[in-house]
Amino acid sequence: MAEEKRDRTRVPIKFDVIISIGKDEIPVKTWDLSMRGLQCSSDPKFKQDENCQVSFILSPLMKFQLEGKITRTSKDSTGIYFSGIPAESFHHLKSLLQYNTDDPEKIENEISSI
């Protein structure tokens, strides 16, 4: 079995996000999310090491965006690393994770240890 390299809690969250690459806006479904990245469904337009923007649209009034980089992609799934998190988006991402986990304090402790 492969050694686990992730050092942040991954929370299984399934919702729609938009991945923007250049002028292309590609809707995908998340599988899991952490403070460092996400795993989502894939698209043939995704290329490993390509920069992208991840748009979370939680409601008509609640939207936030993160800068990302595609770390791996296959026909079934794609991994995206968050390369830039604006301050206002950081708060929304943290809240989203804490709300959807059984151990919100663990998320807080991970952030405090950075």
Image (cartoon, rainbow, N blue to C red):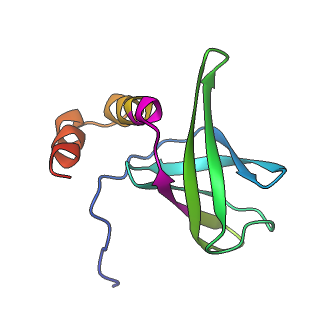
The answer to whether 1 appears left or right of 15 in the picture is left
Residue furthest top as drawn: 61
Q: Position of residue 6 (x, y in %)?
A: 32, 66
Quadrant where the N terminus is found in the figure? bottom left
Q: Is residue 1 above or below residue 92?
A: below
Front-lying residue, 105 or 64: 64
Front-lying residue, 101 or 83: 83
The answer to whether 85 appears left or right of 61 in the picture is left
Residue furthest right as drawn: 23
Q: Is residue 72 above or below residue 55?
A: below
Q: Is residue 52 above or below residue 72?
A: above
Q: Position of residue 101 (x, y in %)?
A: 32, 37
Q: Residue at x 66, y 68 (%)?
A: 50
Front-lying residue, 25 or 102: 25
Q: Position of residue 29 (x, y in %)?
A: 65, 47
In reply to whether residue 109 is colored magenta, the answer given is no
- The residues colored magenta run 79-90
In reply to whether residue 85 is colored magenta, the answer given is yes
